[in-house]
Image: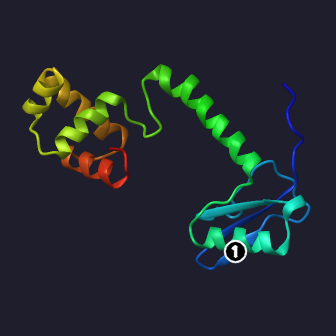
Amino acid sequence: MRRPPARSGACVGARSNGWSPSPRGSTTRACWPPSRPERAACCCRDQATSQNLWRAIQAASDGDGSLPPDLLGRLLGQVSRIERHVLSPRGLTFSGLTEREARVLRLLADGHSTTEVGRRLFMAERTVKNVIHDVTSRFNLTNRTHAVAYALREGLI
């Protein structure tokens, strides 16, 4: 399969203090965040009209991302390959939680005790405690309440 040629791009990053373009003469396949902005947008040089650049800058300043369709397609393909070949064989998801950890945290968020969670998931109470310990250790959290709050806040469950 032949890879499409690299495209030159103009990348834009937006911060609360303004925006910064990519270095002059830069050629990129995908956008890199200049000076580590919170938001970024990309517009390929062959489509870099003033209107398209303005839309990209506006999207970045509004907190939205902007990628040309061909780059977005390649990015999604890479993400899919990572999920299939790296995460799934290890029982992980993009959230960093296994399915079992997510089920335990969901039940805890619903107000169930450790014993009830174990009964519902056909696990020993000690196994539930081990799952909670694994999550709190991995994400550097203090206790089960913190683990549930973190998972809810970050959209992991």
* Quarter of the image with the N terminus in it: top right
Give the image location of residue 141, x and y in percent: 29, 47
Q: Which residue is mark 1?
A: 19
Q: Amino acid at mark 1?
A: Trp
Q: Nearer the viewer, residue 24 or 133?
A: 24
| Image quadrant where residue 83 sits | top right
| Image quadrant where residue 20 sits | bottom right
> What coloring was used for the rendering?
rainbow
Q: Is the residue 34 above or below the residue 55 in the image?
A: above
| Secondary structure of residue under mark 1 | strand
Q: Is the residue 105 above or below the residue 45 in the image?
A: above
Left or right for 144, reference 125: right
Left or right for 10, reference 82: right
Residue drawn at (23%, 34%), measured in percent from left and top?
Answer: 104
User: For mark 1, does the 10 Å Cα neighbourhood hold few (<14), some (14 to 19), or many (20 or more) residues?
Assistant: some
Give the image location of residue 39, x and y in percent: 61, 64
Give the image location of residue 103, x and y in percent: 26, 33
Residue drawn at (45%, 33%), measured in percent from left and top?
Answer: 93
Residue drawn at (50%, 28%), measured in percent from left and top?
Answer: 87
